[in-house]
Image (cartoon, rainbow, N blue to C red):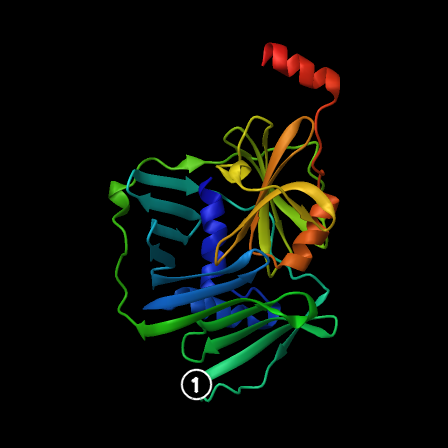
Amino acid sequence: MIFTVALTLVTLLGTLPAPDLVDDLDRAGDAEFVGRQLVVCWAPDGVVAHVTNIEQSGGMTMVTGPNGAFVIGEGKMIEQYAGGIEYLEMAPTTGWRLWDGYTVRDGENATGLSDARVVEIIEGSAIRARFILDAATSAPLTTEVYGRNEALYRYSSLVEFRPRESEPMLDMSDMPEPERRAPGTTATIPASAGHYWAADSYAAPGGVQVFFTDGLFRFSVFEVSRKSDGGGLAELPTIDIAGEGGYHRQHTPGAVSVFWRTADLAYVLVGDLPPDQLEAVLADLPTPSRPNLLKRAWRWAFG
């Protein structure tokens, strides 16, 4: 599921897709720099953190950490790890828009940095995200994401940052043939969940992947066989989320993953949305359940 890696990458990079900042984002995407980034997440299951190396050049961004290198850009998603290389190409079909429940405003620059711009995303009367952008490149130097009651949920900061000369990061001639995902359909995943909307749907290995966004955060829901273990998530303890049992959840600094089974299928959600929005999303998706007695007996007898 290389696209789940891409979701984590987007979170690590602190991208801010707001209409008022389109010019800034275009410049940020073209910026040439190297740096190191600290990401800390105050998750319901405990605090998780890591430091990664970041390099951006030629419209491509590479994040390197203990588990390998991940590259995203120009419709390409590449994972390099000890076992080899995975290369995926996907072509989004839906244009970007921002949920109308968000308001974008300039924030007070209390950083002491004269060459920085502060931008805030407001939901209702509460802050949802704050970004400190480098004035020269618009790269997000600091990103703060807030949960319920304006509690800080995720913080990322470029602890090292320096411009660089443009040069290729990867030799694309050594890449294997890319896997290309075709459009897919599902009868069980709705067109919206919480305030998020389904932007694209792809045929994924063993099932279907539906990509949701609100223009600021994003997540994918994978519909797979009930026999799936969700990439090992099924081995985690079962927990309740918003009063509903049967979920398995894991947080990394950049993303949250949730696995559950219904009577007929299994689902994996991977994204960067904060916990209170996750609860609202799960309430609109198929809920955990077990097969009835007849189905369980049939599966026991025939597999």
251 over 161 or under it: above or below? above
Q: From the top left corner, tell me how far across and down residue 110 is, in percent.
A: 53, 87
Q: Quadrant of residue 139?
A: bottom left
Q: Amino acid at mark 1?
A: Asp
Please name the residue shown 62% across and 14% down the image. Answer: 300
Visible in this render: residue 269? yes
Relative to 273, 293 lies left or right:
right
233 over 273 or under it: above or below? above
Q: From the top left corner, tell me how far across and down residue 193 is, in percent.
A: 71, 48
SS category of the residue bearing label 1: loop
Please name the residue shown 56% across and 64% down the image. Answer: 17
Q: How busy is the neighbourhood of tag 1: few (under 14 within 10 Å), some, or many (20 plus)?
A: few
Please name the residue shown 48% across and 85% down the image. Answer: 111
Q: From the top left corner, tell me how far across and down residue 268 is, in percent.
A: 58, 40
Relative to 292, 4 lies left or right:
left
Residue that numbered label 1 is attached to? 115
Please name the residue shown 45% across and 36% down the image. Answer: 180
Q: Quadrant of residue 167?
A: bottom left
Choose between 17 and 250: the one closer to the eye. Answer: 250
Q: Quadrant of the C terminus?
A: top right
Q: Quadrant of residue 102?
A: bottom right
Choose between 209 and 40: the one closer to the eye. Answer: 40
Q: How many marks?
A: 1
57 over 260 or under it: above or below? below
Choose between 144 and 89: the one closer to the eye. Answer: 144
Q: From the top left corner, tell me how far across and down residue 249 is, in percent.
A: 57, 47
Visible in this render: residue 33? no
Q: What residue occupies the far top of the structure in this picture?
A: 301
